[in-house]
Image: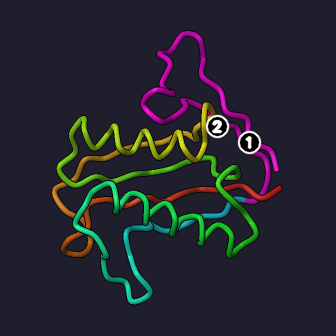
């Protein structure tokens, strides 16, 4: 598996915002559907945004490990935040730094009015690469 994360010098440094500009991947792509703060029955467990982010990324980890991968094999994230603001961005950035450190995957964040189920405040999907 090869994922080369880079940030061209001609573009701003995005790592403080929790993403990188470019991920070059070689290998089998594994697509992970949107993960959110869901319990075993698909219900949200928290009304707290940070709690939902934590659980969504924990669920992402479970999905990755179910196919023999883990967070380092993620090349791309797409994140969706209900009523996005800078405080929520900071929560997300902190979580991404906790998982990926100085080499976060590429990411697109969309602020949205609502998500699939009532009470959902955050969702993340991913593209991972197997060697």
Q: Is residue 123 left or right of residue 27?
A: left
| Residue 62 in the image: above or below residue 5 | below
**Front in this rendered view, residue 121 or 29:** 121
Identify the mark at residue 23; answer none if there is no mark. Answer: 2
Could you tell me residue 30's position as x and y percent? 66, 63
Query: What residue is rendered at 64% in x and 54% in y?
Result: 71
Q: What's the CA distance linking mark 2 and mark 1?
A: 6 Å
- Report the span colored magenta: 1-28
Could you tell me residue 98's position as x and y percent? 54, 44
Where disc 2 sits, the SS reads strand
**Front in this rendered view, residue 13 or 10:** 13
Query: What residue is rendered at 54% in x and 29% in y?
Result: 21
Q: Quadrant of the C terminus?
A: bottom right
Furthest residue toward top: 10
Where disc 1 sits, the SS reads strand
* Mark 2 in CB contact with mark 1 (< 8 angstroms): yes
Q: Residues within 10 Å of mark 1 (few under 14, many from 20)?
A: many
């Amino acid at each position: 598996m090869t994922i080369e994360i880079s940030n061209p010098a001609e573009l701003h440094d995005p790592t403080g915002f929790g993403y990188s500009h470019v991920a070059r991947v070689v290998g089998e792509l594994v697509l992970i559907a949107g993960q959110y703060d869901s319990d075993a029955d698909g219900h949200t467990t928290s009304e707290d945004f940070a709690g939902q982010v934590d659980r969504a990324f924990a669920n992402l980890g479970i999905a990755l490990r179910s196919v023999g991968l883990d967070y380092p094999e993620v090349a791309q994230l797409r994140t969706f935040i209900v009523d996005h603001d800078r405080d929520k961005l900071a929560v997300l950035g902190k979580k991404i730094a906790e998982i990926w450190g100085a080499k976060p995957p590429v990411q697109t964040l969309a602020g949205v009015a609502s998500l699939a189920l009532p009470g959902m405040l955050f969702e993340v999907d991913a593209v991972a690469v197997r060697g």
